[in-house]
């Protein structure tokens, strides 16, 4: 009996380990604005005498993190309802109107039967506007483009597996490169901002525009999620997502059949 139990445990472990593998997809974004400036994080920013805007694509959520800096001695108003992002021409707003509730639901039984519940929670929403004090900055995550990347890029990669220094070190992957004209994914960000007077009324309103395109896309294996996230932390110009493949399931079933065969061959155990 002990051999049977050990065999079952072994079978469960083998099938779990061989049930699939993770394939990682990493994209690199390039800015093609003439007035762009390179940041310390390897990304690009657009700046003028009033505001500086930079975008980070390496968030784990798939959203784009935007840093907005106020260079003036007056408050700066960012109007998110009048700001937007386009992905291949499709407009995607910064404010989606959704709210998330965080809390605990408590239930109690009534004295005369029945029950009642109450929710101890708070609601979190994306604000419609942001006021940035003089010589300060604000950051926020907006517009999740994970689905758009998956739909446009898919999993089709031409060419062969090769070794390429994606993170400044040789790694085994398939990689495709694009220029601005043939890139399958283009993104434009529109940030609406106003300088406020002492009564918090707009003195003037403008829109800062920033353009990006997908300059390369890589398919990687044999790299753990923690290692990949560590490498992406210092690369704001890169984004990624992972897909679980089930190619190892057949191997697990085959090994499982062998274990069952051994049990049947030795019925006394």
Image (spheres, rainbow, N blue to C red):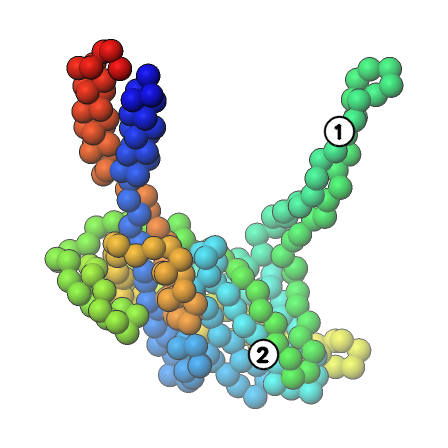
Where does residue 12 sit, x and y in percent of width and height?
A: 33, 29
Residue 194, placed above or below residue 248: below
**Mark toward the start of the polypeptide (2 vs 1):** 2
Please give the name of the residue rendered at 66% of the width and 65% of the height, measured from the top-left corner: 129
- Outermost right residue: 111
Instruction: Look at the numbered discs 2 and 1 and tell me whether their residues touch, using CB distance below 8 Å.
Output: no
Residue 213 visible? The answer is no
Q: Which residue is mark 1?
A: 107
User: For the residue carrying disc 2, how many other residues have a C-alpha within 10 Å: few (<14), some (14-19), or many (20+)?
Assistant: many
Which image quadrant: the C terminus? top left
Residue 66 visible? The answer is yes
C-alpha gap between disc 2 and disc 1: 46 Å
Where does residue 85 sit, x and y in percent of width and height?
A: 47, 62
Please give the name of the residue rendered at 75% of the width and 41% of the height, measured from the top-left corner: 120
Where does residue 266 sit, x and y in percent of width and height?
A: 20, 15
Residue 74, placed above or below residue 110: below
- Residue closest to the eye, 37 or 34: 37
Instruction: Determine whether the residue tagged by mark 1 lies in a helix, strand or loop.
Output: strand
User: For the residue carrying disc 1, how many other residues have a C-alpha within 10 Å: few (<14), some (14-19), or many (20+)?
Assistant: few
Q: Which residue is mark 2?
A: 69
Instruction: Determine whether the residue tagged by mark 2 lies in a helix, strand or loop.
Output: strand
Query: Where is residue 181, by image quadrant?
Result: bottom left
């Amino acid at each position: 009996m002990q051999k049977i139990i050990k065999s079952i445990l072994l079978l469960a472990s083998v099938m779990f380990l061989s049930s699939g593998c993770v394939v990682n997809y990493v994209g690199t974004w390039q800015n093609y604005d003439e007035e762009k400036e390179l940041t310390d994080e390897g990304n690009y920013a657009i700046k003028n005498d009033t505001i500086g805007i930079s975008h980070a694509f390496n968030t784990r959520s798939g959203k784009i993190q935007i840093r907005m800096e106020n260079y003036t001695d007056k408050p700066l108003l960012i109007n998110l309802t009048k700001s937007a992002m386009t992905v291949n021409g499709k407009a995607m707003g910064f404010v989606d109107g959704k709210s998330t509730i965080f809390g605990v639901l408590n239930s109690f039984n009534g004295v005369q039967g029945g029950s009642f519940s109450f929710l101890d929670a708070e609601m979190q929403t994306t604000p419609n506007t942001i006021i940035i004090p003089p010589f300060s900055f604000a950051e926020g995550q907006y517009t999740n483009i994970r689905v758009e990347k998956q739909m446009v890029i898919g999993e089709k990669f031409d060419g062969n597996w090769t070794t390429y220094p994606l993170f400044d070190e040789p790694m085994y992957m398939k990689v495709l490169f694009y220029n601005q004209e043939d890139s399958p994914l283009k993104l434009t960000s529109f940030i609406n901002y106003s300088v406020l007077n002492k009564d918090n009324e707009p003195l003037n309103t403008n829109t800062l525009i920033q353009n990006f395109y997908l300059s390369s896309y890589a398919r990687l294996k044999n790299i753990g999620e923690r290692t990949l996230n560590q490498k992406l932390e210092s690369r704001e110009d890169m984004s990624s997502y992972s897909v679980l493949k089930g190619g190892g399931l057949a191997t697990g079933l085959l090994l499982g059949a062998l274990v069952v065969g051994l049990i049947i061959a030795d019925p006394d155990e």
